[in-house]
Every structure is written in structure tokens, then in C-alpha cells.
Amino acid sequence: NKGKYEHYMQKEIHEQPESLTTTMRGRLIRGGSHKVKTVLLGGLKDHLKTIRRSRRIVFIGCGTSYNAALAARPILEELSGVPVTMEVASDLLDRQGPIYREDTAVFVSQSGETADTLLALEYALENGALCVGITNTVGSAIARHTHCGVHINAGAEIGVASTKAYTSQIVVMAMLALAIGGDTISNEAKREATIDGLIDLPNKVREVLQLDQEMKDLAKLLIAEQSLLVFGRGYNYATALEGALKVKEVALMHSEGILAGEMKHGPLALVDENLPIVVIATRDACFSKQQSVIQQLHARKGRLIVMCSKGDAAAVSPGESCRAIEVPQVEDCLQPVVNIIPLQLLAYHLTVLRGFNVDQPRNLAKSVTTQ
Ligand code: UD1
Ligand code: M6R
């Protein structure tokens, strides 16, 4: 049921304040002062000790689910103290890459039925790793075959392009980082800021959804383009990959997410006065580096669209021709949840304006159950 919306993708983008609330429900536990003190992930509580003692955490997934894990990787590294590596499921299988008994392998999948992820799970089970699932679908193959896990509880996602599952996956993985990190003194400030940020996140998402019309206007400007680049780094490298994936899979426009730190190692050659480029430059530890990327792209006459924190449009815009998308600032590790939303809206409007099927893009299936 699409309710008041024309398409499932549109509905699923706009229901993110509610889906995120459901994802967190019952999992942020209040202390005596009524302040939220700790995170409780029922499915993991008996396994946290083993995860903390593991030699490595390996995230495994495909497409958007892989991108969600990439977005959560820095907070996991920071709070857990355990090295975190990333595997695209098919690539792990192609290489028969190393997975050890001492590893915690985390399988991220909205459907819980993706063939590559499921085969990678079988492979990790054979190799003796502790296998943890993060999935949206109760009773799915991945939920059944993992040793333990967390349901993201985002509600059914119908649109082939994953939107609300992505943001709920990031929130679950941030909660996973808090749960693994425990209440060590060294993590205290970061833990409290992250918990406060989680509680307020649905409000910030409601705020960023108000950019809908602005993104439709931007889509009108980009309707006939051949290509769109998206530059991000740090917490928002994943946002660049995921924004580009949305544009390519539904709007059928070539789009590439680029790690901004790699700009001078090749991508800079593409820059001219025609190619539109989105640069993600919200406030975090990478902000000044992104300011310098913007200057360098501007010096080569790049057609820039800069995503920045509220109030920063003048500070980040190198000239009149640059467009700014201002988004609310949140705790750095949660910023990817806010930042992806304007790009989801952009992909949605571009698709409708270009006259393509939003909910069922050509050649794609919601759940990829063959290799
Ligand atoms: C569970 C109940 C929820 C109830 C809550 C109250 C289910 C599905 N969930 O939620 O309805 O409100 O207790 O305490 O009945 N699991 C995996 N692999 C996965 C995902 C989950 O093995 O990929 C396992 C978990 O380890 C856990 C079980 O499935 O044993 C349920 O997981 P989850 O729904 O996340 O647990 P709770 O949030 O505790
Ligand atoms: O169900 P899964 O999360 O395992 O699916 C993985 C990918 O097939 C999926 O995220 C795909 O990339 C989406 N269509 C992206 O929007």
C-alpha cells in the first residue's frame, strides 16, 4: 500500500523518521536518571564477549548493504578497538579469501536471501568464524543460518532501490559499535554523544526530508546529463558510493562515487565545465580537506554541487556557479544517515522526470537469489 505516495521508493524515503524509530525501539536502555545509558541488542547479548575477543570483525554484503557497513566501519573501529575489514560477498568467494576461527563475520543483507551473501556465510561457517547477521527479514536464510544477529525492523521494503533499509542498517551497526565498546572510560564521551545523536536522529531526518522540492529542482537541472560524480571521504565515502548507486540503478544515469583522497590519482582528469560533481563537505574531521578539494575542483572549472552543514553554504561555495545543499549537522558517525537522504530524493526525482520505472528498474530484481 503506497498510501498518499505515487511510488514505493518515494514512500520508503519519506517514512525514514518512523522506520529509524522502530529500529531503535526497545534497544536504548535508560538508567536511574532516565537518561539513556546503554544499548541492548537482545540477539547479541550472549555473544558480545566473544565478539570483543575476536581478532577481527569482517563485514560482508553486496550493493547497498555493503555500503551501509562501510558507513559504519569508522565508528566500529573507534569504539570496539577490534580491526574491521570489508568484503564484497562475491569477491570474498572469488578469492576464497582468508576467514579464521578467531574472526567475527558480520553478514549484512536487507532481504536475508542474497545468494552471494548466503554462500559467503556458508564459507565463513565452514571456516569456523562466529557469524552474525544484520537483516530486515525475520525467518530469512541469513537470519536462520547465522549464530546470532540483529533484525533491523525497518518494515517491508518494496522498491528495488534500497533506501530505508540502508539508514536502519547504519543505525543498527552504530548500536553494535556501542554494544561492543561497552562502558569503558575512554569511550565515554563518544558513547554519550552517539546515544544522544541516535535519540534525536528521527527529528533530523524529518528536517532533511524538507529538501524534497529543492532536490526536485536540482533534478530538473540534471535531467539530460550523461554522468554525475559524487566525492566523499571518511564517514561519507559510503555516502558517495551509495548516492551514486541510487542514481545509476533507478535514474539509469552513469554515476560514480569517488573517494576524495583519490582525486589527484586519476578522477581529476575528468573535470571540466560540463560534468556535474556533488562534493560532500559536512562538518567533521575531514571538513578542511574537503574544502581544499572544492577549491581544486573549482580551479578546474568543475560544475559543483556541495552538500554542507546548515549555515555553511557561503563558507563552502567557491563561486556563484556553485550550488549548495544544506543539511542538519549530527554526530559525525550518524551524518551518513542524514546525508544520503538528499541523494535518495535526487535519484527518485531524476528517475520520474526521465520517465523511467522507479520501483522496478530494468534488469534488476529486489532480491538477487542467483549467483
Ligand atoms: C526479540 C523479538 C521481538 C521482541 C523482543 C523483546 C523476534 C524476531 N524478535 O527482539 O519481537 O519484541 O525480542 O525482547 O522474535 N538473529 C540471527 N540472525 C540474524 C538476525 C537475528 O541469528 O540475522 C537472532 C538473534 O540472535 C535473536 C533472534 O534472531 O536470537 C531475534 O533477533 P532480534 O529480533 O534482533 O532480537 P530482539 O531485538 O531481542
Ligand atoms: O537484500 P540485500 O541487502 O542482501 O541486497 C543486496 C543488494 O542486492 C542490494 O542492496 C542492491 O544493491 C539494491 N538494489 C541497491 O539499491
Image: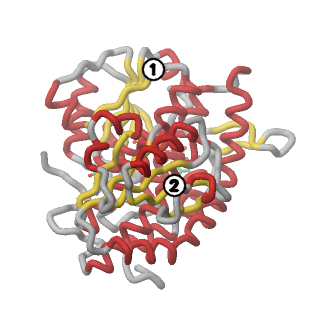
Seen at 24% across and 70% down, the residue is 360
Q: Is residue 368 left or right of residue 57?
A: left
Q: Secondary structure at mark 1?
A: loop
Q: Is residue 156 above or below residue 4?
A: above
Can the viewer see residue 56 in this picture? yes
Q: Label 1, label 2: how many angstroms apart (C-alpha)?
A: 26 Å
> Dot 1: few (<14), some (14–19), or many (≥20) neighbours within 10 Å?
some
Residue type at numbered disc 2: Asn
> Dot 2: few (<14), some (14–19), or many (≥20) neighbours within 10 Å?
many
Can the viewer see residue 143 in this picture? no
Q: Is residue 125 above or below residue 232?
A: above
Viewer-nearest of discs 1 and 2: 2
Closest to the observer: 289 or 181?
289
- In the image, the residue with mark 2 has its CB under 8 Å from the nearest atom of ligand 2: no
- Residue 367 at x, y percent in the picture: 24, 56
- Residue 168 at x, y percent in the picture: 49, 52
Seen at 83% across and 45% down, the residue is 34
Seen at 30% across and 32% down, the residue is 87
Residue type at numbered disc 1: Pro
- Residue 247 at x, y percent in the picture: 31, 62
Residue with the mark numbered 2? 339
Labels 1 and 2: the sequence-earlier one: 1
Q: Secondary structure at mark 2?
A: helix
Q: Is residue 327 left or right of residue 106?
A: right
Closest to the observer: 329 or 225?
225
Residue with the mark numbered 1? 83
Closest to the observer: 238 or 10?
238
Quadrant where the N terminus sits is bottom left
